[in-house]
Structure formats: structure tokens, C-alpha cells
Image (cartoon, rainbow, N blue to C red):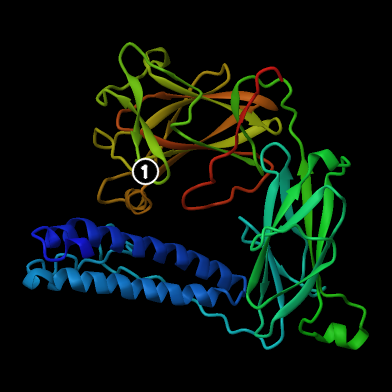
Amino acid sequence: MEKMKGTDLEECFFQEVYYPVNAVAEINKMQIYSGLNELYANQHKTKANEYGKLITECIERERSLTDEFHTRNNGKWNHMQSVYHIGFTHWNDEQCQLPTSHYVNAVRDPRLIVSVANQTDFTWAHRWTRHVLNMPLCFESNYLGEFELANGGIKALEYHIDWEGDWIEIIDVSTGETLSKNEAGTTEVSNNYKVKILKDKWDNNSNAMIRIYVDNGEVVADESENGTSIPMVEIQVQAKTLDLANVEGKCFLEENGVISIEAAHFTNSKASALAKYKEIRDFGRTLSGMKAYPQNIRFDKAEEAPALSYKIFAAEEGVYTCKIYAGASNPVVYHGKLSVGVAVNDSERAAVNTIPDKGFDPWKSASWRVGVLDNIHIGECQLSLKKGLNEITLSAIDPAVVIEKIVLWNPNVEIRESYLGPKESKLYECRPGR
């Protein structure tokens, strides 16, 4: 902006580049800080208060940018940005809400609170209310985990960490240094640690315990009366391995009960005589979208439809829940569908509608409003997978369907809800000559 001052392009640059880039950055940070503030407040961590302050700073900076937009150039564009830019609860800006900030009132003495990364579960250190945390890891798909050790008190927390087995390595995230067993630590707010499992040292024991001991924490009645309770937190590391000996080429590996694939990362794309899939880059909520072109054809026969195939490795045999994430399009005909064909291995394809079969009325129904607010449609079906290598095929049926992501959930795990869906799974590739 400084380089543009005094030039003929100054006002144009501010309105078309500087303002939208900076205002959107503040809104995005506001959303992220709001989510972290709520998460940490629910876990009673004092670091929630840091993110509460950051939310307020983002709100003030975004308002300041908007005020500048309205007053620059002698107020030529006054009120052009008056509509709210965040917190839509309806399809329009009525009853828009800014993020709610949560504040944690800390206890006086140090209090240990531990959580595992990518989980909302957490625990304290006292024996009547604590519970064991689980950290599922796999040598092939995710050999690295992480936990956060936080303080819920005002005074600095002192602790030490011990663990079972020599096939576990714990690394301090802030320093990058590997810990020794029973190494002491201290924190006023929080410390994070990576947990690495080492296959060359593995003793084939699928479980090992990490224990975090409190050295100076608050003393509760149970401890002051009998002196036998030791305040600590246990994390059970669950290690597993996948047999990939017969896998050729590339495939996505199941990780912690889920396989997640960006639609553009297909194994094979098959064009038909009538159409083919093309990638729309930077489309949607994560990476891109895959759409069948031309976009005015319906494919009732699978053999006439373009198709995308994905190779995946399932940890076990079972009926997996498959979720198809698609762009928030509208059907090309009123009360039509937005279906895509889904098949596994050699099975016949099934039509999966990414919008509700009934009651989807643009501008009227609740399901339409949810699609607009969340910027996504999600279709769901059940797929029978064999243990090991499988191939999922998606083929076009209705026009205007833009596929963004495919997610498969193991039947033995609880489906973990999230706005964007799980991050993409690891893509395994067999090395030549292996």
C-alpha cells in the first residue's frame, strides 16, 4: 500500500486488492481463533484466554479496515461494505453474530490438563475423575502423534514424563529435542510433545503407556487425607502395522479408522464417448472439485458415464460408511437430484444423492439453507470392503455435481464430525524392486 500512495492507482488498489485481502485474512483468523478459544475453554485450559484476546483484535482490525474503505476518496464508497462479513445464521445477513469469546478463570495452584491432538477428549490428573487417553498410531500410515500438556492454574506447573518400552520416542515441539525418561519440565500455559513409534525397536507389543506426573500441583482432599494418591495422567499408545506386501502401485491408507481422499487425487480417470471429468482448481472448501463436462447430460447407464477410481487400503473387512462431499450446487431441474454413482471393486454402482431425496427447495427449505451456509452437500452410502486393497469408483449421473472429497469410516469407530471433514489420508506407493 505504501508504494501506491500518491499514485493514480492508490484508491483502486485499496478497494480491489488491499482491503479484500486484509479483511478476509482477519475474518479467517477470527474463525480459527474462535474455534480454538471454545475448544480450550471446554477443556478448562487457561490458554483459551489468549485466543479470546486475539478474537477481539481481529474484530477491531476488520472494523478499522471497513471504516477506512467508507471514508477514503472523500467517502465515494461509503456503506458499500456495511453488510456483515461473518457469522451468518441464515441465508442473508439477518441476525448475524460475531464469534463468542470464552474466558477461563484459573485456579490458584498448578493444575495438569492433558489432551491428545485431533481429539476433543481431555483429562485431569486426580484419580477419581481422571481417565486414560488413547493415541492410536500405525507404523505405515501415521507413526507420529502429539499431546498437549496444559496448565489450568495461575502458578507454573512442574512435572516429569515417563513411558514404557524403547520403541517410543517423545520430542519437545518447542525445542525439537528428544526427551529422556523421567525428564522434568515446567509450563505456565502449555507445552506440546510429539510421540514417535519406532518400528526397528518394536517388541510387537501393541500397547504402551505414557505417564505424566505432577510434581507441584494442587492438593485435593483425597491426597491430603491419605497421601497415597499420585496425581498423574496416562496416555495409552496403541501401535498397529499394515501388511502392504502385496500392494502394487499407489493407494490411500486407513488411518485411525478413516480414509479421506481429495477428489482430484484419483487413481484413474475414464472418459466416455459423451463426457469426461475435469478438475476445477481452487474450488470448494479444501483443494478443488471434479465435474463431468459437458454439464448438460444425465447418465442413466454406467457404461456411458465418465468415471473416477480410487484405490484404498482398508484395515479390516466390514461395511464402511462412505461420505461424498460435493459442491453446494442446485439441481438443473426443479425438485431434481444431484446424484453420483458409487461402486466398490466389481459391484454394480448405486446412485447416491448428495442432497435430500425430499424437501430440498432452493431458497425455501432448511436443507437448502444448510448447504448454502456450510458450502457443501454430503451424500452417504454403505460399502462392503474387504481387508486390504479395494477400488472405489465414482461415475456421473446428474449434471452439476462437483465432487470435492471422499471419506470412508470404519464400522468399528465413531464417526468424528468436523466442518471440513478429515484431512487427507497418507498416499502409499510401492517402491520398485521392493
Q: Residue flagged by tag 1: what amino acid is it?
A: Gly
Question: Which quadrant: the N terminus?
Answer: bottom left
Q: Visible in this render: residue 386?
A: no
- Residue 159 location, quadrant: bottom right
The 10 Å Cα crowd at callout 1, few under 14, some 14 to 19, many 20 or more, is some
Q: Nearer the viewer, residue 114 or 26?
A: 26
Residue at 32% x, 62% y: name it.
88
Q: Is residue 20 left or right of residue 182?
A: left
Task: Give the camera-side residue of 51 and 123.
Answer: 51
Assign the C terminus to one quadrant of the image: top right
Q: State left or right for residue 419 relative to residue 253.
A: left
Q: Is residue 137 above or below residue 430?
A: below
Viewed as shown, does residue 196 lie left or right of 19? right
Asked where in the image residue 41 lies, by quadrant, the reply is bottom right
The percent coordinates of residue 423 (x first, y second) are 53, 45
Looking at the image, residue 298 lies above or below residue 318: above
Question: Which residue occupies 34% across, 26% down?
Answer: 278
SS of the residue under disc 1: loop
Q: Position of residue 377 (x, y in %)?
A: 39, 43
Closest to the observer: 381 or 166? 166
> Can you give x and y, in whole percent of width and height, for residue 291 in the image?
34, 29
Task: Choose between 78 and 386: the one closer to the eye.
Answer: 78
- Coordinates of residue 218 in the picture (x, y in percent): 76, 84
Q: Which residue is mark 1?
A: 284
